[in-house]
Every structure is written in structure tokens, then in C-alpha cells.
Image (spheres, coloured by chain):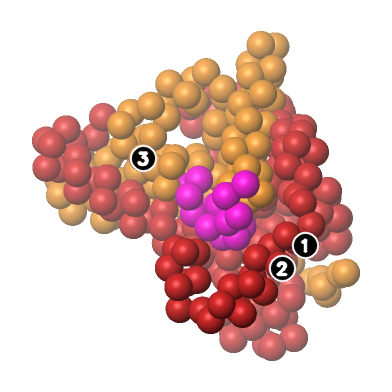
Chain colours: A orange, B red
Amino acid sequence: MIQYFWAFVVGGGVCVIGQFLLDVGRMTPAHTMSTLVVAGAVLDGIGWYEPFEDFAGAGATVPITSFGNALVHGALAELERDGYIGVITGIFEVTSAGVSAAIIFSFIAALVFKPKG
Amino acid sequence: MANKKKKTLTPVQQQYQSFAKEREPQRPVIKNSIRAFFAGGTICLIGQGIQDAMVHWFHYEEDKAGDPTVAILILISIILTSLGVYDKFAQWAGAGSAVPVTGFANSMCSAALEHRSEGYVLGVGGNMFKLAGSVIVFGVVAAFIIGIIHIFLGTGGS
């Protein structure tokens, strides 16, 4: 149960950081998202994202920061396994689920639905 | 950066800029943050529920359950975007709806829907990554640089 509590609090906290970047930092949504992704990548680069995930569960895997984390994770895993070329081949290793799902479902949606609002 | 820009302006233009800035509506930072907190927290809570369901019923390993969870959240987000619900929610929630992966999917899906009338190749295919593209580009470049740093430090995959 405590896992759910931390998922809520940490996930909400990351969103508040995003809101602050938007409102106080006066960034555009694209700048905000890019900043958060790079932040996630850097955190994984120094090895902090995995303990953060263990602690916060979905609070760490659902925000967009986990996308940056997953990119670095794939790159480092293949770097370990295949050598230097792994940095390039491994980048989409882990994130392919999210990116493919978003592309495929968005395309199907565009086939089926008309824009609303 | 703002100051550098100001120097090239005439005094009248500078005067106008400060005039406009004074009258800019104040952003309700506290209210927005509270909304973002609860909206984002709720999405993560749902994610945690899906993740636990994946582990219990589909026998995913604890640390592998994140991927299918993200895919399901993306599917939900795209259905809600197609029905026009997500954008209303996003107006209320601000960053609370944009920061979770559901916001990433929303940006792709709404761009795909919006440009549908321009055709499937140029419209849907070309515009899908309009906002999401910057996320992917910066994420990938950051990951590449971090990988290179790890090579130089000799600390391969950690």
C-alpha cells in the first residue's frame, strides 16, 4: 500500500516541477518536456534513477523523465554487451514499447476519429 | 537573453515592453501546482495499479512490468484524446497531464488528428512528432552523450 502512496506523491511532485518550469521558468511545453527528459537521462547516467524507481514505483516510471532514463539504460546495457557501437544501437532498446505504441495507436486513431473541439 | 534582446530596441520599444509586462495577467502558480500535483499523482496511481496487475495476472517480473504499463497508459490516453476528453482534462490539469507519458501520447495523437485533413503521409505522418519530436531528439542526444561519457570514464553499463 505504501508503494501507492509514494507513487502518488512522487509522480505528483514531478508534475509540480513541470508546472513550475512552465509558470515560473516561462518555458514552452516543448522546452519543459525536453528538460525533464534530459534530467531523467542524466539521473540514470549517474545511476540514481534505478533506486528512485525502486522507491517510487510508477511515480518514477510514468512521468516522461523515465523516457530519458530508458534511453540511457538501453544505451549503457548494450555498451556493456556489444562494445562501443552499443551506445547507438541500444538507445531505443527499452523505449521501443512506448514509442511504437504511441505511433501505432495514434495512427489508428487518425484513421478512425475526426478531431474534436 | 531577455536583456540582450532589449539592448537592440529603441527606448520607446523598451517602454512598451515594460508596459506590457506590467499588465500581463499573473499566473496562479500555487493553484496550478496543486492541480498538477493531484492530476499527475492520480495518473501515477493508476499506473501503479496497472503495474501491479501486470505482475499479478500476467506474471511479468517486477522491473519489466513498466513497459506494458506505459503501453496501456498510452492506449488509454489516445482513446481519451480521440474522444476529446483528454484535452479538457489537460486544460484543468496543466503539467499534471503533460508530464506523465499520457501527455506524450496525447501530443502525438492530437497532432495526428489535427492534421488528418492534410492527408495521411504529409499530414498525419509528418506532423505526429511535432511536439513529441523535441522530446525524442533531446532524449536520444542526451543518452548518446552520457554513453560517450561512460566510455571515457570506463564505467560501461552500470
How far apart marks 1 and 2 lie (CA) works out to: 5 Å
Q: Which residue is mark 3?
A: A42
Q: Which residue is mark 1?
A: B23
| Chain of the residue on which disc 3 is drawn | A
Residue B19 is drawn in which quadrant?
bottom right
In front: B148, or B65? B148
Q: Magenta residues, as a range?
A: A24-37
Please tell me if label 2 and label 3 are on a single chain.
no
Percent of width and height locating residue B94: 74, 49
Q: Is residue A36 magenta?
A: yes
B25 to the left or right of A4: right
Residue A114 is drawn in which quadrant?
bottom right
Q: Amino acid at mark 3?
A: Val
Residue A64 is drawn in which quadrant?
top right
Q: Amino acid at mark 1?
A: Arg
Question: Which numbered mark, 1 or 3, is in the foreground of this view?
Answer: 1
Would residue B125 be seen by someone viewing this image from the given angle?
no
How far apart marks 2 and 3 lie (CA) works out to: 38 Å
